[in-house]
Amino acid sequence: MDDKSLNTARLIALDWGTSSLRAWLLGDEGEVIDAHAAKRGIMQVEDGDFAGVYREIVGDWIAVHGELPALACGMIGSRGGWAEAEYVDCPAELSVLADRLLTIDADPVSLRVVPGVMQPSGPGVRPDVMRGEETQVLGALSAAPELAERGVLVLPGTHCKWVHIAEHRLAAFATYMTGELFAVLQHHSILGKPAADRDGVTDDKAFELGVDTAREAGAAGLSSILFSARSRMLAGEIAAEATPDYLSGLLIGDELRSALTGVDEVPPLRLIGDDALCRRYRHALARFGIEDVAEIPDAARIGLWRIAEAAGLLTY
Amino acid sequence: MDDKSLNTARLIALDWGTSSLRAWLLGDEGEVIDAHAAKRGIMQVEDGDFAGVYREIVGDWIAVHGELPALACGMIGSRGGWAEAEYVDCPAELSVLADRLLTIDADPVSLRVVPGVMQPSGPGVRPDVMRGEETQVLGALSAAPELAERGVLVLPGTHCKWVHIAEHRLAAFATYMTGELFAVLQHHSILGKPAADRDGVTDDKAFELGVDTAREAGAAGLSSILFSARSRMLAGEIAAEATPDYLSGLLIGDELRSALTGVDEVPPLRLIGDDALCRRYRHALARFGIEDVAEIPDAARIGLWRIAEAAGLLTY
């Protein structure tokens, strides 16, 4: 590290989820001075030793830069994480997040945790929850303020979130288990057998056939099309090694169909997440006539910085 | 065995599926003289030794009763089974099944295998396949001939089939992976965690809430409701140990919703399958206003007898 970095460290920011942990040392303007990424999500932390993992990740930074505020978002604040942060009710003013941080008394510095967001049950509304995505949404709106009046943010992953923004608030959201469904079907069901050992073959045509099958099935929905990943293979319509791509297309396609059901005019839509996965969603969205969907990068890091700022953690 | 049984054995009938094998020694009128049931489905047969399992199951019967015809239906005739029997194309005259038996040259007596049925792709039609259910359908129509003009047979299980009968033919069918989806989600996804070690608790109210949630979600479909098995638990709306019943309700409920989409008047409907599972389907069907749905027992055995009869295997 050079001298500048020694002078300007302001915040340790952590995106601590189910299967991974990303940590950044941020400078005066929120710029990245140093970063760690580790497979130390809450499911990989042995015997609940979150304190040990935390010390290991931030210890050197504190040793070099002295005491610094630390702020985390994600599943670390869930019932299965280090300590349970509250949920803010939806519709939610995102500015509220900074007022409701949980503080964990930790070594070498205490850790603040961003609350999650809960959508309560109502007539025709199922409850839903998020932890971590609220911070990404706040970061994304700071990077793309044109969406703050009306927009949709889609966050593909294990549990994909569709987040509706209206009048600068997180108005509503829905969770699709698309990523997890793909993983369990590919690894544990008969649909995964034909290509159990494939190593990342990607067949765009099979993916597209999956998306189109889901689109054309319409209201009959996922239940009615899932088995076609086997029957099309038996009928010779897709190659055995392409079944994972076809299955991925079915699942993402049905997610889009479901999320767009009853929507007459799609609001401005942006993606947040892993590049390869966002590419698949863009491809699928195009089959639904939705083009030019940009990705918003670094949403979690920017969100953590903004929340720290609003909470007065960045003392100068 | 008494003397009568020694005189009247006419057929060895086998329902040989993915996870189980049932075998019957049948008498003059198709009555059961003796029966075996074993966990020797094609997935449990080691090193593909179908011949060994077959000899073990039928050997004693042949030793006592002398040479007899043997007829099997199910996945034993699939690519992953003993030998691949053909598919009859759908719409199918069920009488064709008896004309297209595969013969496997086996010891101590050769084994005939019933063909499967394939629904070919067409505009807006996905291919689909069945093996074993065609025999159950034939047996069911022999037991309930009032459905032969127009009816629906629902066969719950790992891969649930909805079979439409019209003018004495198998007109169309669809596969729902409801049973397998339940198993992989319960054993391998986050939805199964809260009750991973439950031993058969059954919560009818949680099941019913699942069915109703699927019914009310309408066209938004399964993708949009699956995560509610977690969020309702986190929100305190269902107990952790009731999540499997709720999940079962979601999956069966969405299957019914999907299968009934666009159906103005439901034709006479009957169930074929495991008693406990048929009870769940009856409960769910009642939530959709479909009452008094009877089960047809012994459909596979009756179907095998009828096919053997039509194929001239029951020589007197």
Image (cartoon, coloured by chain):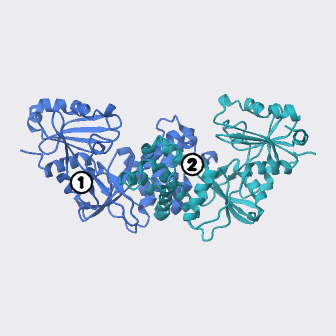
Chain colours: A cyan, B blue
**Tag 1, which chain?**
B
**Tag 2, which chain?**
A
- Element assignment for label 1: helix
Image check: A250 left or right of B145? right
Q: Which residue is mark 1?
A: B138
Q: Which residue is mark 2?
A: A179
Question: Residue B170, located in which quarter of the rendered image?
Answer: bottom left
Tell me the quadrant of the picture where the C terminus of chain B can be found.
top left
Alpha carbons under labels 1 and 2: distance apart: 40 Å
Image check: B30 left or right of B212? left
Label 1 amino acid? Answer: Leu
* Marks 1 and 2 share the same chain: no
Q: Is residue A145 visible?
A: yes
Label 2 amino acid? Answer: Gly
The structure residue drawn at horizontal position 91% and vertical position 40%, both measured from the top left corner, is A7
Tell me the quadrant of the picture where the N terminus of chain B can be found.
top left
Q: Is residue B1 visible?
A: no
**Residue A197 drawn at (x, y percent):** 47, 40
**Residue B103 drawn at (x, y percent):** 18, 44
Image check: B188 left or right of B87? right
- Element assignment for label 2: helix
**Residue A233 drawn at (x, y percent):** 39, 52
- The label shown at residue B204 is none
Q: Vertically, is B190 above or below A232?
A: above
Q: Along the line of sight, which residue is nearer the eye, A229 or A194?
A: A194
